[in-house]
Image (cartoon, grey):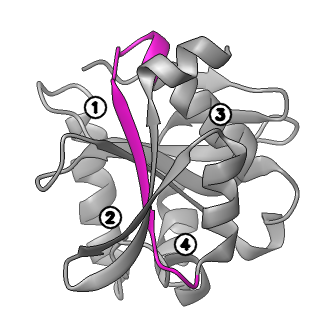
Amino acid sequence: MKIPQFLNTKRLVIRRYVEGDLYRLHLFFNNEEVTGSTDMPLHRSFEETKEFLDMLIQSYNSDEPLFAMAISKKDNGEVIGSCGFASLEFSPDTQVYYALEPEFRGKGYATEAMEKMIEYMVLVLDINRIAVYCSPENIDSINLAKRVGMEYQGTVKVEDRDSEYFLLTREKYLSES
């Protein structure tokens, strides 16, 4: 799987992380308001964040890259969040995810980023099943899943937690495009 250098939307650049993102990524990982409703690690030390970032950057050129990218504003380059996707061990689905800094929520950035990610996943990578698993309390993610065309599949247990499960198939995406 190839990780693009960047993906452009109207207001965003979704790009690979670079070493210069270390400080912002460290703040991001240590903000429980950002990571609290995700599976993202809550790093406590600067060194742990650096190790994670180094591993992520090195993975981009490996045979099994991690598909995690920075969401930055096109007008000023400010990193406002993170997005990506990963295969799931317990399902044939590929889970798409995002997290935004609190001050950038409610402005349509998450929708814009997810629409671009899904487009890339379907049209470039030929991924057949794209899913979102989120906590029942995460109303913003539930609404986002619906906005990007995902269909509610029910409540499932993921790692001993209830999760709302949404799915978008390649066939449905292509029929609505």
Amino acid at the residue labelled 4:
Phe
Can you tell which mark lies on residue 50? 2
Can you tell which mark lies on residue 28? 4
Residue displayed at 43% across by 11% down = 124
Q: Earlier in the sequence, mark 2 or mark 1?
A: 2
Q: Nearer the viewer, mark 2 or mark 4?
A: 4
Proximity of marks 2 and 1: CB atoms separated by less than 8 Å: no
Residue 2 x %, y %: 30, 18
Q: Distance between the residues labelled 2 and 1?
A: 16 Å
Residue 76 x %, y %: 84, 42
Residue stretch in magenta: 122-137
Residue displayed at 21% across by 50% down = 55
Amino acid at the residue labelled 3:
Glu
Query: Which residue is identified by label 3?
Result: 115
Can you tell which mark lies on residue 60? 1
Residue 126 x %, y %: 35, 14
Residue displayed at 84% across by 35% down = 11
What SS does tag 2 mark? helix
Q: Earlier in the sequence, mark 3 or mark 1?
A: 1
